[in-house]
Amino acid sequence: MSKIDSKIPDGVLDQKWSKFKSSIPLVNPANKRSLEIIVVGSGLAGSSAAATLAEMGYKVKVFCFQDSPRRAHSIAAQGGINAAKNYQNDGDSVHRLFYDTIKGGDYRAREANVHRLAEVSGSIIDQCVAQGVPLAREYGGMLSNRSFGGTQVQRTFYAAGQTGQQLLLGAYSGLQRQVGLGTVEMFSRHEMLEVVTIDGKARGIIARNLITGKLERHFGHAVLLCTGGYGNVFYLSTNAMGSNVTAAWKAHKKGAFFGNPCYTQIHPTCIPVSGDHQSKLTLMSESLRNDGRIWVPKKMEDVTAIREGKKKAVDIAEDDRDYYLERRYPAFGNLVPRDVASRAAKERCDAGFGINKTGEAVYLDFASNMKYKYGKQEALVKGIQNPTEEQLHALGKEVVKEKYGNLFDMYKQITGEDPYEMPMMIYPAVHYTMGGIWVDYNLMTTVPGLYALGEANFSDHGANRLGASALMQGLADGYFVIPYTIGAYLSNEIRTKAIPTSHEAFDVAEKEVQQRIDKFFAIKGTKSVDFFHKKLGKIMWDKCGMARNDAGLKKAIEDIRQLQKDFWNDVRVPGEANEFNPELEKAGRVADFIELGELMCIDALNRVESCGGHFREESAEVGGDQDGEAKRNDNDFMYVAAWEYKAPNTFELHKEELKYEVIKISQRSYK
Amino acid sequence: MSGNMNLTLKVWRQKNAEKKGELVTYPVSNISPDMSFLEMFDVLNEQLITENKEPVAFDHDCREGICGMCSMHINGRAHGPKDAVTTCQLHMRSFSDGDTIVVEPWRAAAFPVIKDLVVDRSAFDRIISKGGYISVNTGNAQDANNLPIPKIDADKSFEAAACIGCGACVATCKNGSAMLFVSAKVSQLALLPQGQAEAKQRVISMVNQMDEEGFGSCTNTGACEVECPKGISLENIARLNREFTLASILEEK
Ligand SMILES: Cc1cc2nc3c(=O)[nH]c(=O)nc-3n(C[C@H](O)[C@H](O)[C@H](O)COP(=O)(O)OP(=O)(O)OC[C@H]3O[C@@H](n4cnc5c(N)ncnc54)[C@H](O)[C@@H]3O)c2cc1C
Ligand code: SF4
Ligand code: FES
């Protein structure tokens, strides 16, 4: 028998959640006050969960490593959040959002979870607007929508290019309200470094106060990990510098299975790498693909001329441009899902058509929509007859500025080039991790009482996440799922008194953390933490990035094991333990990334099929109109890979079969 | 690929809140104009680690101008010489080969130094917890489109809500006032119909908390608006003052 039970409720798909919700045992208000919940992470998932649970009456403690909960990485999300509101009357529905998400995820997500997500999506928008989140509006005062990849309806709500910021500030305000009311105790600049389990249940954490360096013990009847994704295993990614896997990895080593670690999202539109000094990559939101057309020159001589600075994008005649997404995928064009768009960019660049010096960049061009869509519209509105090309450009520019101003500014800051005048140069970069801690329908991990929410869990997005769906999932988990499902567990805990942190389980856990910190300082090696992080990133990008193969992955595993040895022999961690010490923080995170990197490669090696963001070169379509496209193998791989940690460098695979009762699986075609 | 700029940095070093700090001089070389200011600091820190010295502690996270964590006072200006950018968005092309650059932490009574360039801005969170929200529990909300909001109001509210809580306004103000920050939040909510129910209490308790935290008073110097990386306008302070006066009068009744 499998060790994992997804606990998906019985019944027909579209009634599972409502029926289940009404059958979950309740915890009465008096008991809630004596139940303590630890929430690690203050992003969309953590803040929304903490605020809601506190409103319900639980005692909540929240932890984050930044100096304020408002700075969690969710703040950086740009483009938007999906919801099946059908305000545009374009045929959207809960079922369509559900269907798009399952298909977008290349049939590797659970039907029941995704349906629930689509069901609660509308309430998220209601909640955010009620909190005063200023989402974009039309002149009539109604909410505005835009399109994102992988869909043919307009269901994405947004606030310019700062949607994550506005949503997080909304959730943060809810959280701070509870802090003010004394129901939430906030621990900023604290890093969780261990999960404490007692009799097999999660009962607390060990956290390091990042200012004083002191280790602290905190008890909870339940622990929620809302600690975000692990894209930084690649060193360069669009994630914030501090984003890390440590909390999830500690949980993994304490018994939480890790789901689909190899599913990584490489986002097609990011600013290309400019040099060795690069510390992170910057996303240019997918929403830009609403109005930008992606192309490279058709002729190699034009490519060469551009690289040598003899020609510019505007010098290339319309007929000499290869709008390769529109050519290959006429039905979705520039709005194909991310994995498809990224691979197509790589294909062109590998074929030699990359337009910058490194050969790793393609154009994202706004000129035609700026002039002929918005420019013409504005000219009509303003009554300008026979506008010149320049007038059209100027009129359209104002519209584009309003839609994407902050992104264009950001691009200019970083590259020194003006995207209103020249097309952007973009290239795919690591962006999001669909993999994460395995959770059941209740969002509980394989450790009782330990939950994972938001990007930290593996649920909902299958092998590829659609744009604007991470914000939706984080807030769904926090506002509308966990507040119910946690009741199933806590209703059996009302007799458990708070366990004093003098309990020996806390002693043991704290000692483990202390020993590791001591070990870092004892190495006194010669290389900085970043040195090893960059090496790891390169191995992962080259061998476990956009395209993967058997030989490469085997080599990567070997290389990572060697890197792990080198790290533990030669890393230099300056300063002391009992003080503010960013290098020590980084050392702990990179040590965990190295271990995770190995598991990602093991998982990628095991999955001898291509699905979503996971592209195995051995598994591609040959011939016909799908030539070169990813080829799934549903017979052998229609399962979630849930990995159990056994011993250092040793993991055991458990399979959760995926059953599709409603959706008819087929090849994912965007042609 | 590295560049060819050579610079002299004078950086504030302070072991912790209790110890005294001082400016220490470090040369850095081979800096590329494409590096961000923080990437230049990465180079410095890598150099210090190699020399077995302690790297400089500084706050940063997103490195794309949105989290509000980075906070360096560069050559006498919060976030450096360019307008409308954060430290992480400042690129070395804004400097010249041979420059001497002085880097200090935010200086304000309400932002004590933690270490080197890192300060404690938790006062901002405490101000928000005194009213920077709309009291609506999860599940209370009506359908989002039941409440049409004129685009103009929504846009203005959004502009105020764009504040990233970096604290440059405080650091740049000779009085160490937090009025721009507080007024941005008060304005965001005051401009929306949802925010009306609690408007009176909100402005009074947020302003009280601001005073309690030791921020100075606003004497309308306007320096904050100039240094704000997100273009938060002084209009917001005027709005806060109106809201505050109104609320105080009503409270007296
Ligand atoms: C540049 C960018 C743009 C994006 N744009 C979009 C978009 O337009 N639409 C969309 O849907 N999605 C978008 N995404 C994805 C989305 O933003 C994230 O998936 C989502 O915000 C993650 O939220 P979260 O709450 O799970 O985690 P996060 O917001 O990453 O929060 C993690 C929290 O955990 C804390 N933490 C982590 N480890 C520890 C530890 N050990 N101890 C204590 N605290 C810890 C952190 O302090 C932080 O508070 C974007 C992502 C990026 C990188
Ligand atoms: S008002 Fe401007 S300077 Fe002040 S905290 Fe907000 S963004 Fe920073
Ligand atoms: S590091 Fe986030 S704003 Fe500068």
Image (spheres, coloured by chain):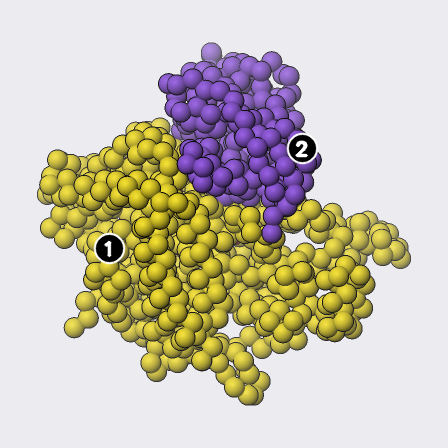
Chain colours: A yellow, B purple
Q: Position of residue A163 (x, y in %)?
A: 53, 47
Q: Nearer the viewer, residue A60 or A590?
A: A590
Which label number is shown at residue B98? Answer: 2
Query: In the rendered image, is residue A131 in sight?
Result: no
SS at mark 2 in the image: loop
Labels 2, 1: one chain: no
**Mark 2 is on which residue type?**
Gly
In the image, farthest residue toward the bottom: A623
From mark 2 to mark 1, how far is it between C-alphas? 51 Å
Q: Please, which chain is the residue tagged with disc 1 on?
A: A
* Vertical arrangement, residue B46 with respect to residue A334, above or below: above
Q: Estimate how packed mark 2 is, as few (under 14), some (14 to 19) or many (20 or more) residues with alpha carbons within 10 Å.
A: few
Amino acid at pointer 1: Lys
Residue at x-position 37% and y-position 37%: A574
Front disc: 2 or 1: 2
Say which residue label 1 marks. A253
Along the line of sight, which residue is nearer the eye, A584 or A450?
A: A584
Q: Report the side of A122 relative to A516 (left or right).
A: right
Q: What residue lies at 21% left-to-right and 60% top-to-bottom?
A: A647
* Residue A642 seen in this snapshot: yes
Q: Residue at x 70, y 60 (%)?
A: A365
In this view, the residue farthest toward the top is: B252
User: Eyeballing the image, is A30 above or below A27?
Assistant: above
Residue A457 in which image quadrant: bottom left
Other residues around mark 1 within 10 Å, as few (<14) / some (14–19) / many (≥20): some
**Left/right of residue A379 with respect to residue A430 in the rendered view:** right
Chain identifier of the residue bearing label 2 in the image: B
Which image quarter: residue A502? top left
Spot occupied by residue B81 in the image (x, y as percentages of width and height): 65, 30
